[in-house]
Amino acid sequence: MVAEREAGAGAGAGGSGARSGRAGRAAAFVPQLADFAGEWRIERRIEDRRAAQILHFAGRARFAPEGAGLRYREEGRLVLADGSELVATRDYLWRRMGARIAVTHADGSAFHVFDPAAPEARHACGPDDYRVRYDFGRWPDWRAEWTVTGPRKDYTMSSLYRR
């Protein structure tokens, strides 16, 4: 992956995120929902421990205004371990929920809720456990790392988002 920006980069034009911390030290950026609006490039690595393979995804995501939230739509190419490629898409809705952000599936069913100041969440789906940790420390570049375990699942999915 390409080298990342220095920590402390601003939110960019129209950003509304806050920085907090002690005087004299670089403070962590805490994004607000509006900071995600717009286009992002995605690079993703999926380490499937059960199948003993690594997959890669590259594409674009767009957070577009919809009602009181942002519609998330990603599209790109998923490269399988054998080199074959598939077109892959995902859709979610992100909404403000007080100081937190609620993420729902495209059909409106609950997925997870996270606090951008303490960006971790969990989603139980039947026997499967989904845990995410967001990292906004190099904003406007940010990461999402999912660890998924269950009877038939054991993978880590690491995504880098860049403007």
Image (tube, helix red, strand yellow):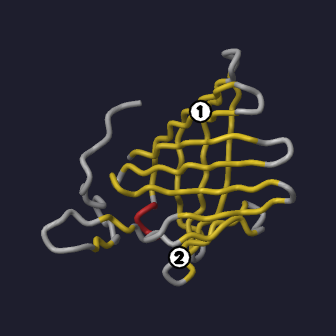
Q: Is residue 18 left or right of residue 126?
A: left
Tell which of 75 and 140 is nearer to you: 140
- Residue 138 image point, x, y percent: 33, 52
Tell which of 159 and 65 is nearer to you: 159
- What residue is shown with label 2? 100
Q: Residue at x 86, y 56 (%)?
A: 127
Q: Residue at x 18, y 65 (%)?
A: 25
Q: How busy is the neighbourhood of tag 1: few (under 14 within 10 Å), some, or many (20 plus)?
A: many
Give amino acid for label 1. Answer: Phe
Q: Residue at x 51, y 72 (%)?
A: 115
Tell which of 133 and 105 is nearer to you: 133
- Residue 163 image point, x, y percent: 38, 46
Q: Which mark is residue 57?
A: 1
Q: Is residue 70 left or right of residue 87?
A: left
User: In which quarter of the view is residue 78 placed?
Assistant: top right
Q: Residue at x 31, y 73 (%)?
A: 18
Give amino acid for label 2. Answer: Arg
User: How many dots with numbers?
Assistant: 2
113 over 36 or under it: above or below: below
Residue furthest toward the top? 82
User: In which quarter of the view is residue 123 placed?
Assistant: bottom right
Q: Is residue 39 left or right of residue 25?
A: right
Residue furthest toward the bottom? 98
Local secondary structure at mark 2: strand
Residue furthest toward the left? 24
In 3D space, how far apart are the residues under numbered discs 1 and 2 (Cα atoms)? 28 Å
